[in-house]
Amino acid sequence: MKIAIGCDHRGYKLKEAIKDFLIKKGVDVIDEGTFSEDSVDYPDFAKKVCISVQDGRAQRGILICGTGIGMSIAANKFRGIRAALVLDEFMAEMASSHTSANVLCLSAIYTTPEKGIAIVEKWLHTPFSNEERHRRRVEKIKEIEEANRQ
């Protein structure tokens, strides 16, 4: 599996911890930046990660900013992206099993490296439930997305 990961300056330390963990687990990681704690604009990195997921270079993406809110808003503007802001392992499980979220958004302010790693593990190891009600809801999201294409 390939995972694209990106962050703004607030998320840099958490990104590095999660990236190191994933690499040690044998996951192929595409690091889309940022590469320091110098101030940057989070939408630029949301765009890079989401394009990597859209074009198939990565199967999933992880985005990190201060609260995770900006990244999730920016990521959900991309066709085919279902980004979920997740603050704990239960939310990670629901993001995967109920919505098949392909981009995970994390808050660097509220998430320690240990907690972030636990969230990522839960998200990656929880399959989409594939129950009819969840398939139907994801299809409705896709229909909304298609209806609003310009």
Image: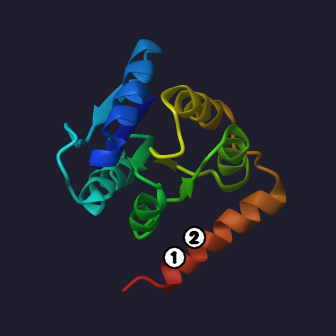
- Residue 142 tag number: 2
Please give left or right for residue 39 compared with residue 88 in the image. Answer: left
Please give left or right for residue 88 compared with residue 5 in the image. Answer: right
Residue 111: give x, y in percent of width and height: 53, 39
Residue placed most toward the observer, 26 or 69: 69
- Image vertical order of residue 83 relative to residue 150, above or below: above
Q: How crowded is mark 2: few (under 14 residues within 10 Å), some or many (20 or more)?
A: some
Question: In the rendered view of the protein, which quadrant contains the N terminus?
Answer: top left
| Residue under pointer 1 | 145
Residue 107: give x, y in percent of width and height: 48, 48
**Residue drawn 57% across and 79% down?**
144
Q: Is mark 2 on a helix, strand or loop?
A: helix
Q: Is mark 1 on a helix, strand or loop?
A: helix
Q: Residues within 10 Å of mark 1 (few under 14, many from 20)?
A: some
Residue 13 location, quadrant: top left
Residue placed most toward the observer, 101 or 15: 15
- Image vertical order of residue 93 relative to residue 66, above or below: above
Residue 62 location, quadrant: top left
Amino acid type, label 1: Glu
Please give left or right for residue 35 compared with residue 3 in the image. Answer: left
